[in-house]
Amino acid sequence: MSKLPDGVDRRSIAGEERLTTEGEPVYGEPTVDGRRVWDAGRSKLGAMLELGMDTHLAGGESILYLGAASGTTVSHVADFSGPTYAVEFAPRPVRDLVDVAESRPNLFPLLADARKPSEYAGVVESGLDSIVQDVATRGQADVANRNAQFLAADGILLAAIKARSENVVADPDEVFEDVRETLSESYEILETERLEPYHDDHLGVVARKR
């Protein structure tokens, strides 16, 4: 099992060890010892950590989060990271993100399209430590490649690839192989793993910017 980032640890709830972070609750998650339970069934990054993938997160990193939605996962990320830029395309979830950010001064919600990084290039700093990506759109690898510009030379991509967003009828393993090939244009892939039993037909990817 890989080491968890500083600020993430496990607490026992009903006899089960669960990931937790310290921060204001966001989505009705249980709390224990003043910490929020990080539900891997609702978070692809949480699933990657539960499965023991080496995310290369130590805590305190600068993060670009693509596909932040209402803030379920990015709120946990902001609990243990440095500056965290949360990109979301839909206005309604961004309103929720603004509420989440009230208790997290390092979280910066951005109403923008992750497929068009020029929309936020003037706001997001360059030389970031990590990109966390969870976008349910066709061309997920292309999105990651376009946003590689924000990473430091040895920056890390942590992506959750949803097979059904690429092709509803194709075999997920074939979809994932295509995604790996496309990602290799900008990244060296370090590790991949299917995210079952937490998320069906999803691939967790850890990659380093070339």
Image (cartoon, grey):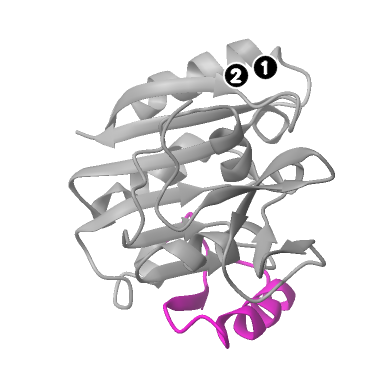
Please state the horizontal and vertical placement of residue 183, each as a whole percent of the image.
38, 29
Residue 96 place in picture, x, y as percent: 70, 78
Asked whether residue 180 is drawn in magenta, I would say no
User: In the rendered image of this protein, does residue 161 appear above or below residue 87?
Assistant: above
Q: From the top left corner, tell me how far across and down residue 144 is, in percent.
A: 41, 43
Q: Is residue 74 above or below residue 39?
A: below
Seen at 67% across and 53% down, the residue is 38
Q: Quadrant of the C terminus?
A: top left
Q: What residue do we see at 32% from left, 62% from top?
A: 62
Q: Is residue 204 left or right of residue 163?
A: left
- Location of mark 2 (residue): 175
SS for callout 2: helix
Q: Residue furthest left?
A: 153
Name the amino acid type tagged 1.
Answer: Pro
Task: Write down the residue under mark 1.
Answer: 172
Dots 2, 1 in contact, CB < 8 A: yes
Q: Estimate how packed mark 1 is, as few (under 14), some (14 to 19) or many (20 or more) residues with alpha carbons within 10 Å.
A: many
SS of the residue under disc 1 = helix
